Image (tube, rainbow, N blue to C red):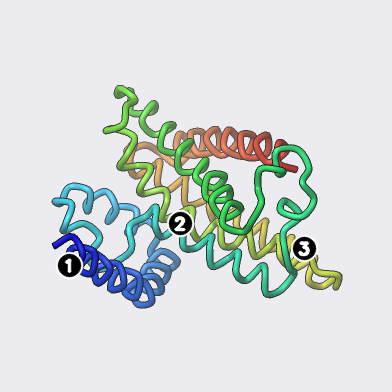
Amino acid sequence: MDFLKLIQSLDELLYEIMSWLIFYPVTLWRTLTRPLKMMDYSEAELGDTAGQQYTDTLSPPLFLMLTLAISHGVELSTVGESDVVTHKVGLSGLISDDSSLILLRVAFFSIFPLVMAARLVRARTVKLNRDTLKAPFYSQCYATAPFAMMVTGGSILMRMTAMEAMLAGFALLIFALLWFGSLQILWFAQHLRSGRWRAFGHASRAMVEALILFSVVSLLFG
């Protein structure tokens, strides 16, 4: 009986993994073309029962993790191993392989949805707890995945020797920050039902907090 349950579990796991080949591109396209609608969709899906959530897309945290895993694969095939794995400086000595590096990057980029979600909850003047934080955090994971992809792409280009590639990488990083920042202003304005200037203030504060925290943690592994 236990063996049959194991086979059934493997069947479900195989189907789930193979379905990512369809639903990852679908989720990525929708997030790139309609990011705000996807963020609203994320919150709406959390109201469904567990088995009915995200049936036609990937869940936001999974989407973010797969995006970083794919970006790391591109990095390996273009510029090689990251310095974090090879140099062993600071806390990077704890990063011994690509799997741990991907998990580290997931934790790093998860700082952005966490800080943005916490800022929204505080701006709403409601109690900050697991329940109030979850919906905005999930929404932000959808927005953070393309941002992480662009940041990783920019860093890959900047590691190349050609000056044109380095300039293109720098331009991509600037575009990523502007895209992500503009999206946050619209998101805060929508959820707080406020004007753009107030939303700009909340988005800017959260962005600065997230970037500072991201940079400080990155230095520990630098």
Cβ atoms under marks 1 and 2 closer than 8 Å? no
Q: Residue at x 41, y 64 (%)?
A: 31
* Residue 110 x, y percent position in the rendering: 49, 45
| Tag 3 residue | 158
* Residue 114 x, y percent position in the rendering: 45, 38
Determine whether, in the image, residue 199 is placed left or right of residue 52.
right
Q: Nearer the viewer, residue 141 or 74?
A: 74
| Tag 1 residue | 4
* Residue 175 x, y percent position in the rendering: 63, 59
Q: Please, what is the three-letter code of the amino acid marked with disc 2?
A: Leu
Q: Please, what is the three-letter code of the amino acid marked with disc 3?
A: Met
Which label number is shown at residue 64? Answer: 2
Q: Earlier in the sequence, mark 2 or mark 3?
A: 2
Q: Which of 174 and 169 is in front in this view?
A: 169
- Distance from disc 3 to disc 1, alpha carbons, whole Å, reads 51 Å
Q: Which residue is drawn at 67% across and 56% down?
A: 174
- Distance from disc 2 to disc 3, alpha carbons, whole Å, reads 22 Å
- Circle 3: is it few (<14), some (14-19), or many (20+) Cα within 10 Å? many
Q: Please, what is the three-letter code of the amino acid marked with disc 1?
A: Leu
Local SS, label 3: helix
Q: Which of 13 and 208 is in front in this view?
A: 13
Cβ atoms under marks 2 and 3 closer than 8 Å? no
Considering the image in quadrants, where does the C terminus appear? top right
- Distance from disc 1 to disc 2, alpha carbons, whole Å, reads 33 Å
